[in-house]
Amino acid sequence: MFTLAQLNTPPPEALKSQAVQMVVDYFSGISPVSLTPSNPLYPLCQYVIGYQMHLYLQAMDSALDSTAQLTLAVDDLDPKPGAGFCPVPAGQG
């Protein structure tokens, strides 16, 4: 079973790293642009989307004027790794 948590502050560093890695790993499935791994631009696009996720997670810092939030799914049996996440668009939290 999974527990959903709504975060208004940055998650722990391990979960941040996992979220960024998930975005990079699943780029083909979440990108509106149809790029295959054989495309020469694929690694660049993976880097860019990973960096965008990194910036989004940084924007969750309470010292910044941001409405960035994150819905995090955590496995109840092993809460250390994140099972999934969803950035919450501004004004939707």
Image (spheres, rainbow, N blue to C red):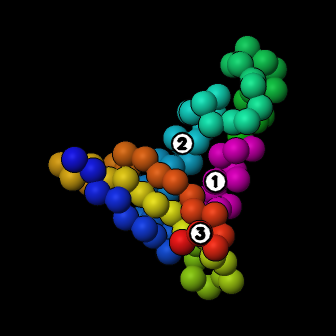
Q: Are marks 2 and 1 in contact (CB under 8 Å)?
A: no
**Residue placed under numbered mark 1 in the picture:** 53
Marks 3 and 1 sit apart, C-alpha to C-alpha, by: 18 Å
Magenta stretch?
48-58
> Residue 10 in magenta?
no
Label 1: which secondary element:
helix
Q: Residue at position x 66%, y 78% from top?
A: 66
> Residue 51 in magenta?
yes
Q: Residue at position x 69%, y 19% from top?
A: 37
Q: Of tags 3 and 1, which is closer to the observer? A: 3
Could you classify mark 2 by the number of other residues whose Cα lies within 10 Å: few (under 14), some (14-19), or many (20 or more)?
some
**Residue placed under numbered mark 3 in the picture:** 92
* Residue 60 against residue 24 in the figure, above or below: below
Q: Residue at position x 32%, y 53% from top?
A: 74
Instruction: Judge whether residue 78 can be spotted in this image.
Output: no
Q: Earlier in the sequence, mark 3 or mark 2?
A: 2
Q: Quadrant of the C terminus?
A: bottom right
Task: Name the amino acid type tagged 2.
Answer: Gln
**Residue 29: image x %, image y %?**
60, 30
Please identify the dominant SS of the magenta region.
Answer: helix
* Residue 75 against residue 7 in the figure, above or below: above
**Residue placed under numbered mark 2 in the picture:** 21
